[in-house]
């Protein structure tokens, strides 16, 4: 087809799916699978399976529209903005696509940027529409490969490639990202639902995988716009837009996404249990949500999304184009990112067991407070018992409420404090921050559970996280024990930490960890080296130090390095291993 829009299928349906191809491509090249002969708009036009028809009959009757624009090696100064204006001309004035009330954009690579720019440009015309944005490996924050092609782009005057660069000074993409986020995140913004899918592997050249190549659009750029981004296993940047048949994952995900919009079902947002209402931020829409798979396992997807949201927040705050935390290293504006902490709105949806225990504690406290009421289960209890238990439960309730409020506030300090430290190790900073964050949340969840369990008189008194022998932990009467924290656990020792290079400690901090690592850290501290392995820092030391700072409502910013000085190391019974 020539440049412009074209109805692939026009029906009476009030919903239309608009396919927009990417850089250096066209409608046929982008959506056609040469191996099977399939064409994605054709797959979508085919009769859906019986389950989809039962779910929404309208899915079998949607309209389909394709848009093609100039993007060749010789397209010179034909910009993304030019493509957006052409799309507007066709959708609004020529083909009247905008008269449909349900507009679902499927944008591959740069096509996703064209779609988002179209929405920001025409937002006033779209206030009464239901909008869907399905981004297929779209570089929301740019692509490193565009950086590599920038020299050639300058020679050819290729403005499209230049606009896709990963760069602090890429104001075009940065502005678009800020404007679009404002439209779909604000309560009074447009009615936009979104889904991102992204590539898994680098593109092969003549069927061969080239060593050291990365996916063309990295995860942090392709999974930063909406929650619940999905990696398509085995797909590269080219094949991800060419499903082989109707059973391909990317096609099924698209169909499900369309069905949700047609049914007017809001995109599922994870909400806390009803017991968590006292902690939820009713009047503030959270930017970062972290969930748990079980009592001690933060959701891996939540951790991944956390990075995307935080990097997006940092990018907006310092007006730079970032794709990962590595991009902050050596950045002259890196210190300014600390200002983003005050803007971070983080919600942790704690495990169901914690909310259940808290609910039970609140019910008991209410019965103690109203013990004179015949409906109270403590109506006939003696007054000293009532007084002691009321005081104890009130103290625990205040402590739990404080921790539920402070634990999320401490998370950005961990992420930022590790930026410089992780640069000393071969492990990517994102990996190290992920480990430290995950273990911080594990310990925090354990502390909350322990406090509530003790308040309910379910167990005898135990020490802080994983500080007790396995037999003591098992007395909590739940299925988890120390080996749920880390694999192959060994004897746990206490360490008395007196200094971390980069953090001024107001008091000695006791931390816990495996015997071999504890003794190694102590011996190096005695010799004056104080060098700690990266894994030891991120798995044990940093999470526990940050828990202490959170519990004390500290605002100290720890710029961690590899040194930590330990005064003494003992077993759990107090035996000094330093002698």
Image: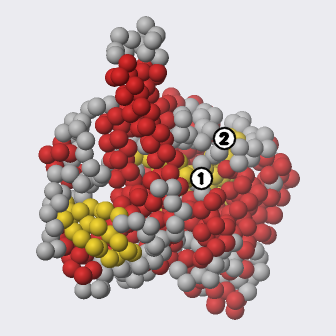
* x and y, in percent, of residue 339 in the image: 64, 67
Q: Is residue 50 visible?
A: no
**In this figure, which residue is indicated by the disc labeled 1?**
345
Q: Is residue 189 visible?
A: yes
Circle 2 SS class: loop
Q: Residue at x 70, y 62 (%)?
A: 178
Circle 1 SS class: loop
* x and y, in percent, of residue 425 in the image: 37, 81
Q: Residue at x 41, y 58 (%)?
A: 548
User: In the drawing, does residue 535 fall left or right of residue 120?
Assistant: left
10 Å crowding of disc 1: few (<14), some (14-19), many (20+)? some
Q: CA distance from mark 2 to mark 1?
A: 11 Å
* Quadrant of the frame with the C terminus: bottom left
In this rendering, the answer to whether 358 lies above or below 64 is above
Q: Residue at x 43, y 15 (%)?
A: 371
**In this figure, which residue is indicated by the disc labeled 2?**
283
* x and y, in percent, of residue 167 in the image: 63, 79
* x and y, in percent, of residue 541 in the image: 33, 66
Residue furthest to the right in view is: 93
Question: 551 and 5: which one is in front?
Answer: 551
Q: Residue at x 57, y 66 (%)?
A: 311
* Quadrant of the frame with the N terminus: bottom right
């Amino acid at each position: 087809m020539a440049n412009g829009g074209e109805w692939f299928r026009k029906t009476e349906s009030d919903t239309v799916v608009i396919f927009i191809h990417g850089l250096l491509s066209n409608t046929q090249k982008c959506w056609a699978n040469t191996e099977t002969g399939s064409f994605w708009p054709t797959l979508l036009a085919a009769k859906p399976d019986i389950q989809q028809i039962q779910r929404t009959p309208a899915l079998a009757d949607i309209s389909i529209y394709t848009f093609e624009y100039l993007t060749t090696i010789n397209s010179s100064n034909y910009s993304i903005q030019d493509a957006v204006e052409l799309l507007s001309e066709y959708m609004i004035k020529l083909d009247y696509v905008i008269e449909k009330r349900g507009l679902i954009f499927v944008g591959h690579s740069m096509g996703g940027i064209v779609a988002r720019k179209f929405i920001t440009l025409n937002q006033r015309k779209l206030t009464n529409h239901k909008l869907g944005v399905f981004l297929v490996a779209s570089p929301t924050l740019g692509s490193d490969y565009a950086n590599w092609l920038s020299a050639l782009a300058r020679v050819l005057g290729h403005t499209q490639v230049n606009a896709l660069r990963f760069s602090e000074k890429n104001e075009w993409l940065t502005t678009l990202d800020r404007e679009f986020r404002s439209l779909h995140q604000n309560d009074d913004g447009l009615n936009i639902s979104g889904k991102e899918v992204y590539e898994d592997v680098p593109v092969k050249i003549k069927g061969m995988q080239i060593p050291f190549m990365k996916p063309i659009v990295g995860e942090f750029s392709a999974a930063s716009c909406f929650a619940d981004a999905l990696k398509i296993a085995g797909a590269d940047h080219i094949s991800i837009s060419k499903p082989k048949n109707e059973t391909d994952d990317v096609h099924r995900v698209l169909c499900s996404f369309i069905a949700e919009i047609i049914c007017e079902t809001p995109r599922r947002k994870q909400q806390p249990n009803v017991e968590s209402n006292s902690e939820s931020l009713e009047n503030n829409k959270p930017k970062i949500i972290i969930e748990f798979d079980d009592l001690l396992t933060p959701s891996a997807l939540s951790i991944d999304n956390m990075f995307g949201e935080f990097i997006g927040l940092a990018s907006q705050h310092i007006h730079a184009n970032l794709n990962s935390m590595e991009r902050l290293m050596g950045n002259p504006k890196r210190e300014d990112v600390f200002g983003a902490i005050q803007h971070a709105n983080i919600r942790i949806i704690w495990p169901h067991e914690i909310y259940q225990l808290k609910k039970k504690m609140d019910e008991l406290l209410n019965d103690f407070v109203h013990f004179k009421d015949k409906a109270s289960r403590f109506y006939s209890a003696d007054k000293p018992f009532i007084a002691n238990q009321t005081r104890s439960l009130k103290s625990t309730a205040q402590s739990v409420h404080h921790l539920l409020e402070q634990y999320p506030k401490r998370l950005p300090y961990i992420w930022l404090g590790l930026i410089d430290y992780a640069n000393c190790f071969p492990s990517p900073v994102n990996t190290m921050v992920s480990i430290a964050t995950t273990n911080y949340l594990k310990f925090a969840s354990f502390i909350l559970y322990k406090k509530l369990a003790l308040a309910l008189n379910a167990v005898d008194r135990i020490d802080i996280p994983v500080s007790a022998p396995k037999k003591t932990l098992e007395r909590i009467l739940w299925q988890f024990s120390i080996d749920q924290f880390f694999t192959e656990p060994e004897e746990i020792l206490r360490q008395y930490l007196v200094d971390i290079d980069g953090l001024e400690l107001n008091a000695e901090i006791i931390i816990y960890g495996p015997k071999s690592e504890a003794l190694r850290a102590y011996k190096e501290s005695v010799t004056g080296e104080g060098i700690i392995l990266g894994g030891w820092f991120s798995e044990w030391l940093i999470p526990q130090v940050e828990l202490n700072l959170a519990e004390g409502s500290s605002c100290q910013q720890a710029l961690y390095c590899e040194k930590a000085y330990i005064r003494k190391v003992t077993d759990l019974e107090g035996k000094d291993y330093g002698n």
